[in-house]
Amino acid sequence: MEGALDCETDNISRTMTEEEPFMKKMLSVLLAAMLMMSLLAVPALAEGQVLTVVTWDTTTTPYLIAQKEAFEASHPGVTIEYVDAGTGNEYEVKVNTLLSGGDTSDVIMLKENDQVVKWQSQGFAAPLTDYIADYDMSGFVGIEKNYAIDGVQYGIPFRSDFWVLFYNKDLFEAAGVDLPTNDMTWDQYAELAKKMTDKEKDIYGTHYHTWLSTVANWAVCDGKYTLADGTYDNLLYFYKLYQDLEDYGACMTYADLKASGLKYAAAFENGNVAMLPMGYWLVSTLINDIKAGNASLNWGIVAVPHADGVAAGSSFGNMTGAMINAKSEQKDLAWEYISWLGGPEGAKATASVGARPAWVSEEIADAMAAVDGFPADDNSKAALLPVSVAMEWPVGEKVPDIKTIVNEEHSLIMAREVTPEEGIEEMNERVAELLK
Amino acid sequence: MSQAEVRKGRYKMGRLEKKNTLIAYSFLAPNFIGFAVFTLIPVICAVALSLFEWGGGDISRLKFVGLDNYATIFAAKKVAEKGIGYFFGRADLGIALKNTAFYTVVTVPLTIVCALALAMLLNKIRGAVFFRTVFFFPYVSSMVAICVCWSFMLMRNGPVNQFIMALGIDFNKGWTADSTMAIWSIILVSVWRNMGYYMVLYLAALQGIPRELTEAATVDGANKWQQFLHVTLPQLKPTTFFVSVMMVISCFKIYDVVAIMTEGGPGRATKMLVTYIYDEAFVKNRYGQASAISMVLLVIVLAITIIQFSSEKKFSND
Amino acid sequence: METSVHGREIRKDNPVLRRILRVIIWILLIALAVFTLIPFFWMISSSLKLDREVFAFPMRWIPETYHWENYSLIWERVPLLTYFKNTAFIAVMVTLLQTLTSSFAAYAFAKLNFRGRDVLFLCYIGTIAVPWQAYMLPQFIMMRSMGLYDTLWAMVVLQAFSAFGVFLMRQFYRSIPTELCEAARLDGLSEYGIWARIMLPLSKAAIATLVIFTFVNTWNDYMGPMIYLTRDMNKTIQVGLRRFIQQYSSDYHLIMAASLCSLVPVSVVFLCLQRYFIEGIATSGLKG
């Protein structure tokens, strides 16, 4: 303190000239740095029309590459330029920031169902009313309604992943057990999982990834119940089923998986897991990994098991789509792109790499089954057309809050910190408080 | 000293003081201009934002709501109805505050003690270069890789538990999936990662202690411990002030480790203030509420800083 | 000369006890070092495994077969070299600006008295306390309107003027005896002269610390570049690392390999600068 006071008494007539050498050095370094900076010029834009599409994992997602190639081939003079906006949850953070900053990219891809609601409410989504009047949406079998708000369409789906049951044919054949079928009940499935478990050979009957959807989401398959209804008693059966399997040793424990971060694809490809309920996206991963020589196993898919009173072949899923940025300066071209993307032509491009397009038809199912590396048996092909697909989560204002609560309690149940009954009661209470 | 006082009296006010202030400003300007434009103004915007409802998008969508955001995060209605116990027992903010405070109270002293001990040990010793580098390594490496490593180390049958079992303690649970141990795994990783960082700070500060002082103490017959207590520690006070303020702040802002290792779970066992802010801002698009939570954090940190700040002044006025 | 006498004096008083103490300290240090390094050992071993082996039960410390090709794969899969260049550019620029401006400003905070000093200083600390997540959006909107979005310059100006450096340097300057300033003033040096000729040389250790911290923090920053840099030619190493983590699959073996590579430059910076922690500088000027 005292020192600071004393400094006040300094004679200020002296100037910086005394310290010239040091300052000069610093300044010259700075100037050199500035020069370097100016060399980083913006690259020249490609000629012709360029459509910018904001999406994720652009260089590594096979269907994005296939779609770009197919669209550019059928639309000469148009170039698709992907804007890579991160991966995982960061996609939403980054897109939100970009759009709030006034970004003028033409098309924004929708990763989660509720993104269209969020971005529409912020004024980022262009309404598609004028365009869809003569656009055929029959192939979407109704899922496009998730992108409509108050009767106005804001997005077009182009991918729809529903859940199927993957199984390892080699393990079933080695154990001499009949393969899973397309119309198993959950009880039959649990029995099968126990039957396939072989502790001596370190073989697990089934595998549950750590998500809520792998264990509890099955309750929505009936198409009536949703996870935003506010009551969670329907989940009890599935938690009990899971804990029974975990106790038996028919699957790896949640705590271990959570800590180790073991990926479901790796778990399945390691070859000691007989069954795996998972989203359809795993198909293209498996095909690619086996082609690349990173894994070798014979696998197949069947419809996910069904609860009593629910039709066999009912599943749930998620969709991926695209919307037009309200600030885009070439909305017509953007519409040309997203309508193509969702329609049969785009669907073929999407299906060609093993991804599951939103447009469903026999023709597309044939195309999916014809992908090199897809299992050749009839059951696997039949599983491509589910009877019904419920949405994993409905869309609504309070849904993000409900999601947080249900996931928090889910993790407690799964880590055995509380019993399923206690956890479900907590879900009921907390969501009720929120909805009040 | 007396000379200075005389001069000070002579020029007490007036032009010279103004010129001195100008000199001070000329020192500040290069940093302050950048700081004001790129940090201070956005921060002030965030303070204001806590009084608005905003989901992002055009600025025209800002809606003034007064203190509503604060009422929401403090669960004002419920607390009025059910008492303060509700806030700390069930409200997200209360739980996040509790977890963050616990984490801070444990981590700050633990890290400081470890860092100071390491710095003292490595101050003048052969092979110090090697050890210093080793202990600084965790801080240098990328967060994802580190957290993934540690999650694996702390698994149910991972190496850490194997070590504990070898000591004869029966512990057979995965740390990150256990309600009580999860926060300790965060603490462990934080201390492990940051002790090298603060060790470096202390090492640098130790170089600044005039050797005359320690020598004088030795001559006076003080042993090493007394020397440490009465010479080294007081000399390190400015650094300790810096370290403790920075640590309190960074502990209150803990995010990455939690996001990668436990995602706030299981349940809400490791939900922290910033994980909560992140969730409100980027998952639920409630920027106003996120700002309001940040203000709670700001007030707490400023309060702690001012206390530490004034004690620093007392010290230097002695 | 003085020190050697002083050292001998201490060693004289109890040689056996001292030796035992020294051995204990060494054992302790080695144990701690092993504890610190274990995760890195696992990192190295994972970087040489196949993707699916990384998390396989039971864990293996030594890979079955060594997959050295992982280290060439990372350079092929993503333009890692570009990322390295960008990160190096940002880190060097930030460190330069940060060290220069904050050591300058810190002098005013530590050794000068002026109106509003304490309030201003609290402002600086206050901004450290606000989490970036809270003001990221206003900041982004502003930066974008300045045309800085998706330029490396954005990352430079965002980090170069942080309050951290000012705070750190202020604390170090405070521990430098004020008598030194006074003496210099009596000798006729201006404040700028005092800063350049006395404070800077005396705070070598502090500057080395600041350089290391700034460099490391900038090098490892993830969220900033993630939001502000979009084109591939502008991305940084930490953003590049996450490109191995994708929606439905992540390649942890490659992440480990790339993280280890990204460790090299920062370690070099640390090794180059750490000699300043050993070089005693404190006795140099007090006599004045």
Image (cartoon, coloured by chain):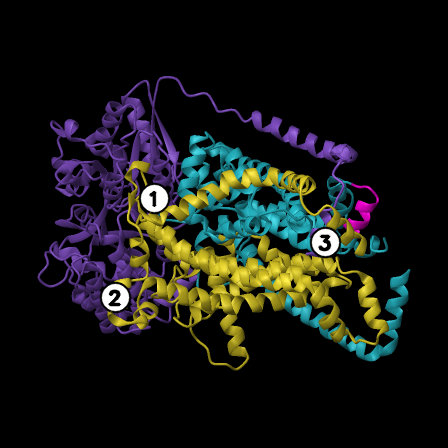
Label for residue B189? none
What color does chain C have in the rendering? Answer: cyan
Label for residue A3? 3
Left or right of A127? Residue C178 is: right
Q: Chain ID for label 1?
A: A
Quarter that holds the N terminus of chain A:
bottom right
Between C32 and A341, the one lying in front of the other is C32
| Spatial separation of the CA atoms under disc 2 and disc 3 | 53 Å
Q: x%, y% of residue A133?
A: 11, 28
Visible residue check, residue A67:
yes
Outermost bottom residue? B168
Q: x%, y% of residue B116?
A: 66, 66
Q: Magenta segment, which residues?
A: C180-189
Q: x%, y% of residue A118?
A: 26, 43
Q: Residue at x 22, y 73 (%)?
A: A421
What color does chain A have in the rendering? Answer: purple
Give the mark, 1 or 3, whose residue is nearer the N terminus.
3
Between B135 and A283, the one lying in front of the other is B135
Residue annotated with mark 2: B78
Visible residue check, residue A293:
no
What residue type is disc 3 on? Gly
Q: Chain ID for label 2?
A: B
| Spatial separation of the CA atoms under disc 1 and disc 3 | 52 Å
| Spatial separation of the CA atoms under disc 1 and disc 2 | 32 Å
Q: Secondary structure at mark 3?
A: helix
Residue annotated with mark 1: A92
In the image, are marks 1 and 3 on the same chain? yes
What color does chain B have in the rendering? Answer: yellow
Q: Main secondary structure of the magenta part?
A: helix
Quarter that holds the C terminus of chain A:
bottom left
